[in-house]
Image (spheres, rainbow, N blue to C red):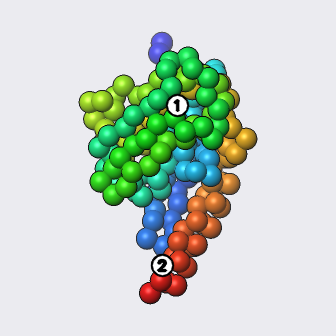
Amino acid sequence: MSESVPAREWVRYRHARFSARFPADFLYSASHYCMREVEPGLWQVGFTKFATRMLGELVDFVFRPALGEPVEAGMEIGHVEGFKAASDVYCVMNGSFAGGNPALAADACLVRTDPYIDGWLYAVRGIPGADAMPVQEYIALLDATITRMAEQEHAAE
């Protein structure tokens, strides 16, 4: 008899011209990263759908820490380049670097097309940083962020 995997619960979100679904069982950071524990103490970290929309298609990525090297939340650990923007990548975990996502070498577009499951960026053995939050808190932060962006856009007109 095979063990069944429970269906993932998604939270739908819509604000202005942005809509997305967020996995309810992930943690999120104020810097628009998502974290999921794939085995006890091993976390995969990726960009949220909001972050991928700001970056566009990913074309290049580099991670600096060596496997097993200590990392901490807030530490710059690499960079990514997209068609729309380039961005430093910051760690949102405390622990040891467990590597970048090997699937991205073959298809960097996974970061945008499947950011939560196959398009994660890097893994860490450890614990989430102090600003990790559940999905509902992240959605409240996202509401404030999008509202602020819209106000700045209108002020610039």
Disc with the residue nearer the chain's start (1 vs 2): 1
Q: Identify the residue shown where x is 50% and y is 65%.
A: 14
Q: Can the viewer see residue 19?
A: yes
152 vs 48: above or below = below
Q: Amino acid at mark 1?
A: Gln
Find residue 70 and report its horizontal and vertical position in percent. 62, 23
Distance between the Cα atoms at labels 1 and 2?
A: 34 Å
Which residue is labeled 1 in the image? 44
Find residue 2 and report its horizontal and vertical position in percent. 47, 15
Find residue 42 and report its horizontal and vertical position in percent. 58, 23
Q: Amino acid at mark 2?
A: Glu
145 vs 151: above or below = above
Residue in the foreground of this view, choosing between 68 and 38: 68
Q: Can the viewer see residue 114?
A: no
Residue in the foreground of this view, choosing between 25 and 7: 25
Q: Identify the residue shown where x is 60% and y is 37%.
A: 75
Q: Is residue 63 left or right of residue 26?
A: left
Which residue is labeled 2 in the image? 153
